[in-house]
Image: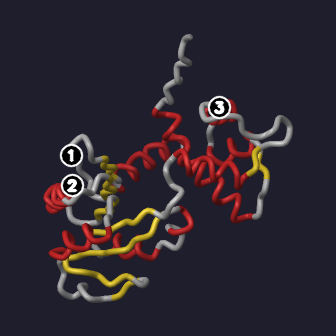
Amino acid sequence: MSKTRVKPIPDETISRLFPYMRALICLLKEGTEVVSSNRLSEICNINAAIIRKDLSYFGEFGKRGIGYNVQNLLDTVRGILKMEDIKKVALIGVGNIGTAILSYPFFYSEGFKIVAAFDNDKEKIGKKIKGIIVEDINNAEKTIKAENIKICILAIPVSETCKVANMLANLGVNAILSFAPCQINMPENVEITNIDLSTELARLAYYSHIHSK
């Protein structure tokens, strides 16, 4: 008897599940109970046929001519992305960007909770920002291990990014979001995403110029 071969799920499909999840969260907040693939397409700016194909990898969803139950689909997508539980996050660097991150009001509703923040500035250490007491960076090892934190956000100068990222990897952190405009080589078991604001603005400036012609 031949075994059914499991069809591999493309990385692109997994990547698109995140904007689907964000859209579904927003729809739920608006009180929307049912959504069509065409409506999701408008929100996510992704072709409706691609959305239907992406979801088909994980089973049958929705009813033809009616659409998807928003709550059920959101629960399913969260399950696929292992986002059923709130993920603990640590923030390294409580400057302007770090403070803005701590002030972001929707992390919890989207599955994340910043449980610790660290800095090396003595004037910031001990201050309470949005319910989080800023700790000395030297306490990071103790707190990260005690809280079993696997995700960290870096909002620190470029000169410190590589050293801190490697320190976090040694503590068992395996997912890092960095706001430093540089690429960091990390072990294969550590996923790192860099957000370079200057590069993104330069890209937007280019398209602004193109669209202004």
SS class, disc 3: helix
Work out which quarter of the rendered image holds the N terminus and state it. Answer: top right
**Percent x, y for residue 131?**
42, 84
Q: Amino acid at mark 2?
A: Ala
Is label 2 in contact with label 1 (beta carbons under 8 Å)? yes
Q: Amino acid at mark 3?
A: Ser
Residue indicated by mark 3 = 56
User: Which residue is drawn at the image coordinates 50% and 67% (left, top)?
Assistant: 107
Q: Is residue 132 above or below residue 207?
A: below
Is label 3 in contact with label 2 (beta carbons under 8 Å)? no
For disc 2, the neighbor class at 10 Å (few under 14, some 14 to 19, many from 20) is: some
Determine which of the numbered discs, if any, sits on residue 169 in the image: 2
Q: Which corner quadrant of the image does residue 47 belong to?
A: top right
Q: Which corner quadrant of the image does residue 156 belong to?
A: bottom left
Instruction: Tell me the distance, in whole angstroms, between the alpha carbons under discs 2 and 1.
Output: 8 Å
146 or 11: nearer the eye? 146
Q: Amino acid at mark 1?
A: Met
**In the rendered structure, which disc, 3 or 1, sits on the residue that comes first in sequence?**
3
Judge left or right: residue 6 versus residue 125: right
